[in-house]
Amino acid sequence: MLDLPDDLLRPEPGRIVHVSPLRSGPAAGTWAITVPLAPFSAADPYDPATFRPGTDGPEIIATAVAGEFIDLPGDDLATLAGRTFDFPVNPHDGYIDASIYLGGGHNPVDITRIEFGAARAQDIDAVLHAAFDFSQEGVEIANRSALLHATLRFERLA
């Protein structure tokens, strides 16, 4: 079983999307956040024991933490700037539907807190408090928690 090191959980710039309330479907009026991780190497992308930092291969793992249906106020970055929001874990009402594809499985991620920094014209810094559950999909990675520090680029889906 792999204890996923911080070297393999290095966030890269991501995106934060507000979905217009005028759209149809369950995402209308909610937010989504995607935080890619820096690519890393593996001898076998389905065998976590072969995961290692760097991109010398032979396989390159490129993945992201993706959260959808996030209930946040407003429709722009100014309403989020400098604020902290707490969320329950799945399956309690108000949880963030988040996951990461790793080791051959879509592994749940409980994002229990988001701390937003100052907003700029098109981006905002955020810290996501995340708990990774690799056991649900039977992936040979130990469950763990992490703080993901990322700059998020703002997009609006009309």
Image (cartoon, rainbow, N blue to C red):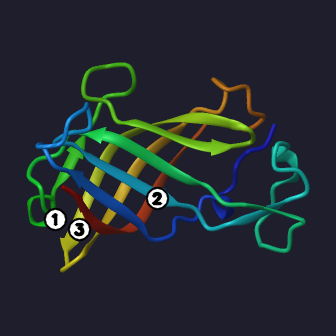
- Residue type, mark 2 in image: Val
State the residue lying farthest toward the bottom. 121
Which residue is painted at 40% across and 48% down in the image? 129
Q: Nearer the viewer, residue 58 or 113?
A: 58
Label 3 belongs to which residue?
117
Crowd rating for badge 1 (residues with CA inside 10 Å; few <14, some 14–19, many 20+): many
Crowd rating for badge 3 (residues with CA inside 10 Å; few <14, some 14–19, many 20+): some
Whichever of callouts 2 and 1 sits on the residue coming sooner in the sequence is 2
Distance in Å between CA atoms under marks 3 and 2: 16 Å
- Residue 66 vertical placement versus 55 (above, below): above
**Badge 3 element:** strand
Closer to us: mark 3 or mark 2? 2
**Residue 66 drawn at (x, y percent):** 46, 48
The answer to whether marks 3 and 1 mark residues whose Cβ atoms lie closer than 8 Å is no
Label 1 belongs to which residue?
77
Residue 133: in sight, yes or no? Answer: yes
**Residue 37 drawn at (x, y percent):** 58, 62
Whichever of callouts 3 and 2 sits on the residue coming sooner in the sequence is 2
Indicate the quadrant where residue 2 lies. top right
Quadrant containing the N terminus in the rendered view? top right
In the picture provided, is 147 more to the left or to the right than 6?
left
Please tell me the numbered disc located at residue 105: none
Distance in Å between CA atoms under marks 3 and 1: 10 Å
- Residue type, mark 3 in image: Gly
Which residue is painted at 88% across and 52% down in the image? 50
**Badge 2 element:** strand
- Residue type, mark 1 in image: Leu
- Residue 150 vertical placement versus 114 (above, below): below
Closer to us: mark 3 or mark 1? 1
Distance in Å between CA atoms under marks 2 and 1: 17 Å
Q: Nearer the viewer, residue 59 or 125?
A: 59
Q: Nearer the viewer, residue 138 or 143?
A: 138
